[in-house]
Image: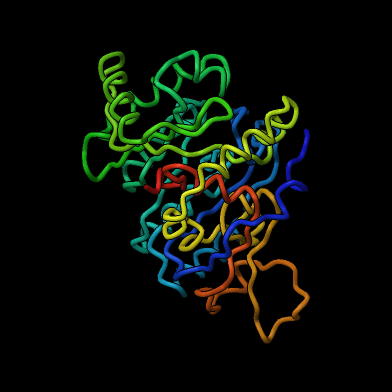
């Protein structure tokens, strides 16, 4: 696969720094039951990288030491990590709000038949990828038959109260099926709600639009088709300075499956670690593990940036919580 990383390192993106950390985002591993074309972590059924229970306990220790109130679980399919349920139980016992970045199809996979009920029991927020309300577009991005499996999973969630009851939050995620920016989030959300309700009697709370980053699998596609330069021109030409105030990296800490720490999930995939200084640890240290940072002050630290950062600030902006503007 062609790699865009060498093209992203030199950048004129504005310098930004961290605020107080509010959310830990954990990549529980690259194992997934799908292989989507827009996936920025190159997840798939043959990946073997999975976060260990020891690293999960290190994360829980960090939560206890730093009063973290939100835990955002990603993958791959995070639910395929064998310690997923242990982590959810431990986090919710601490009063931490847990977000599950769910691909929906995992809810109907063999061996995961009771997963939806487990998530509902612990009031886990489900943020689920559904790149379109049209079957053809979804299957093009995620594979043949994925759309109908996703609809079946959404209907199961609705039957449990997800997307209907306020304490069972169900959000959907839109990624463009190509080298263009997402449309207006509020208008697209209404289109999703109208079509999913009329065609499948499905309800959900919010739609989150996320810009495709020019990295990993999507970045390789851009290079192979000669679209990379035009896409970067689109991102940089659509830069909005006001989005700098609310980019997710200012309040989020991203942790990979081995426990190493980054400013965001995209930096994690590019192996661009958190910039941080500790007087009692060797100054030539290249990356930090979460267990080394239990009592560290990260507020004010410089955020590691690259050309891909223009993806979060283009147009209406983009974050794991959807549009910024």
Quick check: 26 left or right of 71?
right
Q: Is residue 256 above or below residue 165?
A: below
Quick check: 127 left or right of 60?
left
Quick one: quadrant of the N terminus?
Answer: top right
Front residue of this view, candidates 260 and 114: 260
Q: Is residue 194 above or below residue 292?
A: above
Image coordinates for residue 201, horizontal then vertical, percent? 26, 19
Q: Is residue 169 above or below residue 151?
A: below
Image coordinates for residue 123, horizontal then vertical, percent? 31, 47
Image coordinates for residue 237, horizontal then vertical, percent? 55, 42
The residue under the point 51% across, 30% down is 111
The residue under the point 30% across, 42% down is 169
Image coordinates for residue 80, horizontal then vertical, percent? 56, 39
Which color scheme did the rendering employ for the protein?
A: rainbow
Count of all numbered marks drawn on residues in the image: 0
The residue under the point 54% across, 30% down is 180
Q: Is residue 137 above or below residue 218?
A: above
Quick check: 270 left or right of 62?
right
Q: Farthest left residue?
A: 165
């Amino acid at each position: 696969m062609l790699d865009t990383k060498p093209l992203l390192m030199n950048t004129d993106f504005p310098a930004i720094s961290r605020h107080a950390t509010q959310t830990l985002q954990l990549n529980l591993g690259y194992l997934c039951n799908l292989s989507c074309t827009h996936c920025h972590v190159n997840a798939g059924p043959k990946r073997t990288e999975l976060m260990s229970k020891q690293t999960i306990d290190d994360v829980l220790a960090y939560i206890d030491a730093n009063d973290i109130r939100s835990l955002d679980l990603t993958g791959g399919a995070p639910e395929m990590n064998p310690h997923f349920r242990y982590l959810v139980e431990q986090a919710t016992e601490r009063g931490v709000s847990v977000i599950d970045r769910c691909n929906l199809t995992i809810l109907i996979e063999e061996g995961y038949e009771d997963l939806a009920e487990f998530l509902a029991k612990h009031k886990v927020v489900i943020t689920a990828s559904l790149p379109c309300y049209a079957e053809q577009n979804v299957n093009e991005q995620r594979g043949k038959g994925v759309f109908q499996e996703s609809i079946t999973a959404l209907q199961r969630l609705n039957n449990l109260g997800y997307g209907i009851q306020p304490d069972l939050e169900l959000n959907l995620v839109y990624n463009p099926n190509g080298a263009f920016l997402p449309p207006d989030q509020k208008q697209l959300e209404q289109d999703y709600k109208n079509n999913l309700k009329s065609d499948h009697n499905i309800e959900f709370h919010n739609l989150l639009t996320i810009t495709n980053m020019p990295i990993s699998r999507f970045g390789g596609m851009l290079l192979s088709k000669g679209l990379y330069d035009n896409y970067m021109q689109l991102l940089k030409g659509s830069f909005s300075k006001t989005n700098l105030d609310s980019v997710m990296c200012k309040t989020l800490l991203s942790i990979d499956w081995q426990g190493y720490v980054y400013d965001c999930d995209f930096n994690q995939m590019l192996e661009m670690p958190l910039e941080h200084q500790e007087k009692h640890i060797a100054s030539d240290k290249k990356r930090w593990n979460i267990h080394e940072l239990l009592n560290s002050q990260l507020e004010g630290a410089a955020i590691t940036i690259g050309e891909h950062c223009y993806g979060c600030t283009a147009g209406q902006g983009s974050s794991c919580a959807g549009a910024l503007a």
